[in-house]
Image (cartoon, rainbow, N blue to C red):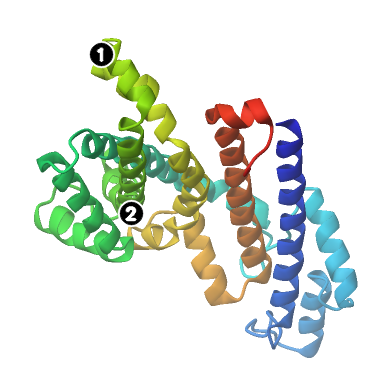
Amino acid sequence: MLRYISGKFVFMLISLFLLVTVTFLLMNAIPGSPLQSEKATSEAVQKNLEAYYGLDKPLYVQYGTYLKNLLQGDMGISMKKKFQSVDKMISQSFGPSLRLGLSALVTSVVVGCLLGILAAMYHRKLLDNLAMSLAVIGLAIPSIVLAPVMQYFLANKLGWFEVAGLNGPMDYVLPTIALSSGPIAVIARLLRSTMIEVLNADFIKTAKSKGLSGYVIIVKHALRNSMLPVVTYLGYLTAGIITGSVVVEKIFAIPGVGKHFVTSIIDRDYPLIMGITIFYAVILMVSRFLADIAYVLVDPRMRAGGKVGK
């Protein structure tokens, strides 16, 4: 188990290094100078700006300097927001993104698991059909469509919620629904299909013959043995919700990292683009790494045998 986790950690570091390198090279491969939109009054001012951001140095020197600063937690200075560091901009705006992401993540897991359990317990019955119908709707309607529809009907027409902004707890409801609708459907379908197989297994029949209650059978036996696909999906889900909130944050005017990401692309703010890309990549890789650890902890066969994937 320790060897498996260590291998995953080393692979995560190598992947992060490759991503930083590729991102840096792609940014520098874009034609034109990122400062060309600046209203420089003379060639001397343009050269001073390039010297300030280190753009006058050879590419390998820029790369080495960027890696050195990155290891020290310095992602550079924004080219459009004067004298503002990228890491400070991300840290200040990550709070709303994190709260929204956690809200959507918890909602996805709780509601998705409940729908999946009900669908499996009442297989081919009314509750199963209703749960799977909701899952299909959640998968069919993307957040970029669902968000403005809810804004129009629930906020604008009915006045139940604010159209945009985060001024109170209720303002998280609509963006949370928009972000979690798809993951709820995926988790419900995963858990349903796995739990149906588990409920027909011999050890469940043995538990029933011993007179165990339905609650004990579902929670302590069936659910735990059905959670492996869901745990695997959670790694991608965690990163997907946070990084996928860019569009939802823009629609609901949420002052999160997504706002900076959109404006940085429009403004060609290379340090900010690279900083947010690396930041999102770290979230993705750490989430996947934690999901791998959780997978080992949930599956007793891996803890006992120490071999994964065999």
Q: Measuring 77% from the left and 66% from the top, which residue is drawn there?
A: 21
Residue ID for mark 1: 213
Residue 274 location (% of width, % of height): 66, 65
Q: CA distance from mark 2 to mark 1?
A: 33 Å
Residue 245 location (% of width, % of height): 43, 56
**Contact flag, marks 2 and 1 (Cβ < 8 Å):** no
Q: Is residue 6 above or below residue 141?
A: above
Q: Measuring 22% from the left and 33% from the top, which residue is drawn there?
A: 121
In which quadrant of the rendered image does the N terminus lie? top right
Residue ID for mark 2: 182
Q: Is residue 15 left or right of residue 194?
A: right
Local packing at callout 1 (Cα closer than 10 Å; few below 14, some 14-19, many 20+) is few
Q: Is residue 257 above or below residue 39?
A: above
Q: Is residue 286 above or below residue 67?
A: above
Observer-nearest of 240 and 173: 240
Residue 224 location (% of width, % of height): 42, 28
Q: Work out whether mark 2 precedes mark 1 in sequence or the reverse, and give the earlier one.
A: 2
Q: Is residue 309 left or right of residue 187?
A: right
Q: Is residue 82 left or right of residue 243?
A: right
- How many dots with numbers? 2
Question: Residue 50 lies in what quarter of the image?
Answer: bottom right
Q: Secondary structure at mark 2?
A: helix
Q: Three-letter amino acid code at disc 2?
A: Gly
Please name which of the two marks, 2 or 1, marks the residue nearer to the observer: 1
Q: Three-letter amino acid code at disc 1?
A: Ser
**Residue 198 appearing in the image:** yes
**Residue 95 appearing in the image:** no
